[in-house]
Image: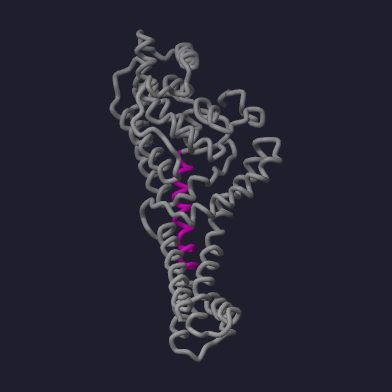
Amino acid sequence: MLLQISLFLIGLLIVAWTLFSAVRSIVLPRGMPDSLTRTVFILTWQVFRFRLRWTSSYLQQDRIAAYFAPFALLMLLPTWYSLVLIGFTGMYWSLGAGSASDAFALSGSSMLTLGFKSSTNLVIDGFMFIQATIGLLLVAMLIAYLPTMYAAFSRREEAVNLLEVRAGNPPSAVEMISRFNRIHGLERLSEFWPRWETWFANFEESHTSLPGLVFFRSSRPEHSWINAAGAVLDGAALSLSTVDIPSDPGAALCIRAGYLALRNICEYLNLTYSPDPTYPTHPISITRQEYDTAVLLLEREGVPIKPDREQAWLDFAGWRVNYDETLLNLAGITLPPYAPWSSDRARGFTPGIFPWSDGKSN
């Protein structure tokens, strides 16, 4: 009797845990980490990582990695089904449905609404109806989840694609400021930052409530949301610290929206970062030489530069330190293409296999 009660409770806990996992992953409109979903994604990634070892170019890597997020997402449904099936098997066996194999067959018949197995026990019949309802709900939730996810993906990629017009390909903060100076004039930068502040806010909301989106790759292999975010944040940091124009609060708000979004996503994905970094206590990945080279390129394009270079560098590092660590953490796990000051210094980056590793913008 004690064994039957224990088995029923264990089965009930498995079913409840699985349902809470599905609700946290799909229904709950906020970022709440789920251990089961995380485990499925990690195990799926191990399979893809093994295959990626045999790639010799970034394009091959991108084609394979593009399947990772969709495949991991679809693997959630059979995982949930399997756990619910196991949980109800234990419950049916404890209620006297017969042998373990009979209980398993009864659970499978109810879960998939096949109806080839029945029971004469009214209590078991009630649990069979509940299990069939759970099976239908899980499928319905996943079907409803996909349009929402792809709508958020489309909004994200629209801005990423448009950035190529402003910042080149791969996106570069230096190129973005230079093009604004040539085409519109630097005063038009004030119209650019609010759009990306909104993008970061929407990005944070969608990529924490729909975390699989973090790993969905752009439709074009040379594009990446993390590279786009890095270019915009660096552009804002350069405009505030280095470019000799009136200080724009919109650029500062854009940086704040950006680093808060990146931090929240890192927190959801369990990626460590310094919560309150300051320069020079926390060094940044951009060297002074790289910064000076960028300033020289801006000068050649006719961009006005502040005369106090030392203070400009300190100001730039002070802005960059807010998002440097989180930017590189996310670049390290999403396998983006080459882009200066972001993916080119992320952990695991291999310059030799990236066709855009010359750093030139188009």
Residue drawn at 53 percent across, 79 percent down: 110
Q: Is residue 252 left or right of residue 285?
A: left
Q: Main secondary structure of the magenta part?
A: helix
Q: Hey, which quadrant is residue 265 in on the image? A: top left
Q: Tell me, what colour scheme is on the image?
A: one colour
Q: Residue furthest top?
A: 307
> What x and y, as percent, mark residue 267?
40, 42
Residue drawn at 53 percent across, 68 percent down: 81
Q: How many marks?
A: 0
Q: Residue furthest front?
A: 2
Residue drawn at 29 percent across, 19 percent down: 246
Please name whichever residue, 359 or 6, is drawn nearer the observer in this view of the structure: 6
Q: Is residue 142 magenta?
A: yes
What residue span does the magenta drawing correspond to?
138-159
Q: Is residue 353 magenta?
A: no
Question: Which quarter of the figure is the C terminus placed in?
Answer: top right
> What x and y, as percent, mark residue 262?
41, 38
In the image, is residue 84 above or below residue 210?
below
Q: Residue furthest bottom?
A: 120
Residue drawn at 31 percent across, 28 percent down: 252
> What x and y, as percent, mark residue 349?
59, 31
In the image, is residue 126 above or below residue 32?
below
